[in-house]
Image (cartoon, grey):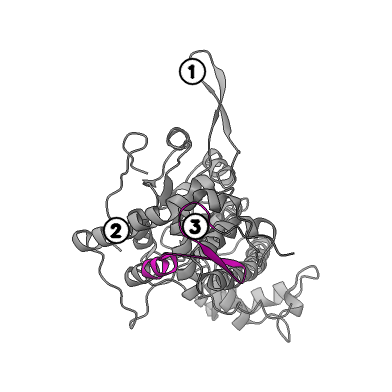
Amino acid sequence: MQHEIVVPDDGAGTGDHVGTGVEVAGDGAALLDELRAAIGKYVVLPGEEALTAVTLWVAASHIQTALQHAPRLAVVSPTKGCGKSRVLDVLHETVHQSMMTVNTSPAVIFRVIGKNPPTLLVDEADTIFGPKAGDKEDLRGLLNAGHQRNRPAWRISGPEHKPTPYPTFAMAAIAGIGDLPDTIMDRAVVLRMQKRKPGEKVTPFRSRYSVPELNALRDRLAAWLGPLRSTAARMVPEMPVEDRAADTWEPLVIIADLAGGRWPAQARAACLAMTRHEAVQDEQSSLKTRLLRDIHRIFERENNPEALPTQDLVAALIQDADGPWAEYGTKGLNAYHLGNMLRDFGISSANHRFDKGRQAKAYMRNRFLDAWARHCPDLAEAAPDPAQGTGPARQGYGLPPAGPTGSLPIGPPGAITGPKRSR
């Protein structure tokens, strides 16, 4: 069903329909091009679609008051040093009223979100949602509720203990090692960052030169989009996806339609590629989580030995009549498949000496502790080893990837804070 797209009529100039978008007189498309180039100069993102998405997300922050949904931007990576903090540096200088924070509390956010909310930039989210972070359900609930307008958090407040609604609606970029909680990822445009290849170069981020350039783009975005808020609020763009994915991506597509040119088609292509990619990631993640649980059960059945030979572990998995492993691949799960799947969690086999001097490739039980703690917390009985890596390997977007084979320090409320961090 084709929805009507409203042509701007609030002083921004006349407009012409172009496909499903709106051609706005002025330099909207050119300004987005400039912003896209500036972002790409300082960070290497997973693909062209990701660069398009971040550009539109930044612009959408400047019309938050006109939006019905506030998409999250999940900036995740398997290890440190993948550019997550640099992404937040660039966002800090380009989004509407940025508020940088690390390990904040719901009470702080309740008090800074109002009718014109800041754009929340949350770094080191793994310290908030990781296995050692403790109970953070209030913060997770706030970030979930804030995805949609008119979802206040009620608290007892004041000496009269009066029930008081606190607004939660605000755009948020959240960066951390490993995936964020599923309920947040489901409401987010997801950037799966990787370390730069040797040939991939970026311009060093230097406050003296970089901040004025990015702030100038921020101010031009505000000047362009400010008069278009009422237009944006009335737009109902045609979306290539449905349900929550459509809610999340609609603000980005609205910006693209306001800009016109090649941006409407580019935005919808990025939406399709990135949502399909995440759907496959969800499927693969579910299978890998099943593998971790099955291996935990096998170790328990064997009275939790220090190690299990690779071939014994593979055989035990295949013999599980209720598991998917006998049909995995073309001839069932093998040692190569097992190694590939576990490598995503930073787990690998090694030579091990068993009783009577026998040596064999084996998997050490202690290498699984971190993965069990992060991905199967109900199974974890010991603190994870901080030396172990975690998080699935990431890949760029473009065409959707193939599926599995065989089937905050912060100042006073409202202040703009946050020191620059190194890459």
Which residue is at a point 60% across and 38% down the rendered structure image? 150
- Along the polypeptide, which appears first: circle 2 or circle 3? 3
Name the foreground residue: 301 vs 6. Answer: 6
Residue 322 location, x and y as percent?
A: 80, 67
Q: Badge 3, how many Cα within 10 Å: few under 14, some, many 20+?
A: many
Give the residues drawn in magenta, as a range.
8-35
**Residue 158 got which mark?**
1
Question: Disc 1 to disc 2, how far (Cα)?
Answer: 42 Å
According to the picture, the residue beneath numbered tag 2 turns out to be 216
Q: Quick one: SS at disc 2?
A: helix
Q: CA distance from mark 1 to mark 3?
A: 34 Å
Q: Earlier in the sequence, mark 1 or mark 3?
A: 3
**Residue at 24% of width from left, 58% of height from top?**
212
Q: Nearer the viewer, mark 1 or mark 2?
A: 2
Tell me residue 394's x, y (percent).
51, 72
Q: Judging from the image, what secondary structure is the residue with disc 1 in?
A: loop
The answer to which of 173 and 9 lies nearer the viewer is 9
Dot 3 corresponds to which residue?
73
